[in-house]
Image: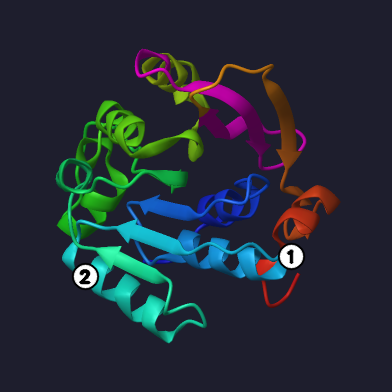
Amino acid sequence: MKIGTDAVLLGAWASLEKQPFSVLDIGAGTGVLALMLAQRSCAVPIDIEIMDAIEIDDDAYEQCVDNFEQSDWADRLFCYHASLEEFAEEIEDKYDLIISNPPFYSEDYKTENNQRDLARFADAMPFEHLLEGVSKLLSENGLFSVIIPFKEEEQFIGLALRVQLFPNRILHIKGTPASEIKRSLIEFSFHKTKLDTKELIIETSRHQYTLDYINLTKDFYLKM
């Protein structure tokens, strides 16, 4: 699976200010989010001892494990081959930071590629199941960071409130200055705070990236 802009944005934006001891990536795919956080923790530096990921798809799981093993942080990264529901029931540990780029394509059609469907469609991991799992696995003072379509923001926040997760930060993503808001990056916690909402524009024109986007993501691109 290719690494998309969504993953890069989330991996770069998720806060490490609270210096998390343990991190969990839900629906890891290639493992890029966990790898980005590992890279960032070394740059700060922050001593993240536990960096776990879970992935249900067979091929994605194998690729994630291979990527973890070939990285500079192989001693800290571990991927579980399980569903979120199975993982939440079996694991007693709590995580200081949970991050997820969940499947969210809810259109009423499927392709001929079952693996791609599993990664892209919301019925593979409904938002309710994601938030319920997060509420069980997040530590009392932990943070949960997620990226979703902007059109799903209101519904997602409403579902989060049901499990006592409050939005603390939101970053709205626009492709260009003239385009509509496409994505919402949201940070949740169990503590209600004043909501900090900002906006980021990716490009001014094709491949002409804004300074805000460059500053956020430049550490993760070979050419930026």
What is the crowding at mark 1: few (fewer than 14 residues within 10 Å), some, or many (at least 20)?
some
What separation in Å lies between label 1 and label 2 (alpha carbons)? 29 Å
Give the magenta part as a residue range: 161-188
Residue 71 seen in render: yes
Q: Vertically, is 64 above or below 114?
A: below
> Which quadrant: the N terminus?
bottom left
Sequence order check: which comes first, mark 1 or mark 2?
Answer: 2
Find disc 1 in the rendering and name its residue.
Answer: 218
Residue 3 seen in render: no
Find disc 2 in the rendering and name its residue.
Answer: 59
| Residue 215 placement (x, y as % from top left) | 80, 56
Circle 2: residue type = Asp
| Residue 43 placement (x, y as % from top left) | 70, 69
The residue sitting at 75% across, 52% down in the picture is 213
The residue sitting at 69% across, 66% down in the picture is 45
Q: Vertically, is 176 above or below 36?
A: above
